[in-house]
Amino acid sequence: MVGVTLQLYDQGEAAARKGACCAGQDIYDARTVAETLGIPHYVLDYESRFRTEVIERFADSYASGVTPIPCVDCNRTVKFRDLLATAEDLGAAVLATGHYVSSRALPDGRRALFRAAEEARDQSYFLYATTPQQLARLRFPLGHLKKGEVRALAAELGLPVADKPDSQDICFVPGGDYAEVVERLRPEAGEAGDIVHQDGRVLGRHRGVMHYTIGQRKGLGISTPDPLYVVAIDAQRREVKVGPREALIVRTVRVNDVNWLGDTSFEAACAAQSEVYVKVRSTRPPAPAHLDLDASGRPLVHLHNGEEGVAPGQACVFYDAASGAARLLGGGTILRAQVTDTTERARVA
């Protein structure tokens, strides 16, 4: 057994920030834990690949008017692609991480992911892109425990991190000011433009598309008799479109880059209009939906009860149940959300 910690970005400002993860203090803490356990500890410099795969994509997304999830990109590339390869080079049979998600073997020998025992801590939403091949080499020993139980075990083992504060996202954004990071890397994202009502009226000016996301109400800088929300962002025209709250409710989501972890193929599941439960934001519970195909054979997700504030760039994640230890069936990136979709086929009886 060996311990590994990743150095992902410049430790300078983040290292001193309370709640920062993957920073200098974390490296020191991990080394101390390894010494307590009597195992070797390695620090891997992944700063360059993290910048390319996560930070640059993060900036590109905001500059193009979509809302990214950097944790998904980090898990998919840096941790479960690159770190797994390093683990193999070290001769490790498996890679264990501290994610709050459960992994269990299925009757046919494949491994599947399930929501964590403590729903408030569950991180399965951020792990939907994990492939079956990666799952075979991954273990998540904290998934069946609650955070309080983990802290108690750490204290019992004499580990100095038993009472360490929880980390907060986004790890590489000093002080939580993501706009500063985006504007530094993509200055065009800070160019001002019009705030336009969905009926075509220009209501004011905005500070740059990077400051806005679908569903946002605060910080618009306009005065209107009724509350207005961001309903769309057109980065090419530098327009932020606003409308009433009811304009946020969508019934159909178009997804791409789907990673499917179900027992049948994703194409078969869509063709059968399979019932699933989906999360379109990490903080929302799974809601009933069904899979479908449009006239061109592209995947759609129909939300039975509708959802508010579904943002392109976020993830639409599939489960087999609404609560409890639901199995993760995969997910994809949200391309577009629609109020209705005239291409929906008649439901299969």
Image (cartoon, rainbow, N blue to C red):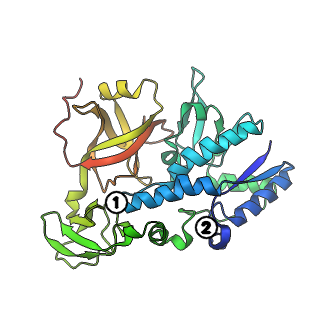
In the rendered image, the residue lying farthest to the right is: 38
Q: Secondary structure at mark 2?
A: loop
Can you say which quadrant of the picture contains the N terminus? Answer: top right
Q: Secondary structure at mark 1?
A: loop
Horizontal side of residue 107 vs 292, given as left or right: right
Give 187 or 32, whichever is nearer the viewer: 187
Q: Position of residue 116 (x, y in %)?
A: 55, 44
Question: Marks 2 and 1: which is nearer the front?
Answer: 1
Q: Is residue 327 above or below residue 240?
A: above
Q: Amino acid at mark 2?
A: Gly
Distance, label 2 to label 1, CA atoms, is 28 Å
Can you say which quadrant of the picture contains the C terminus? Answer: top left
Q: Image quadrant of residue 132?
A: top right
Q: Which residue is mark 1?
A: 65
Judge the density around disc 2: few (<14), some (14-19), many (≥20) Cα neighbours within 10 Å: some
Q: Position of residue 222 (x, y in %)?
A: 24, 78
Q: Which residue is mark 2?
A: 19
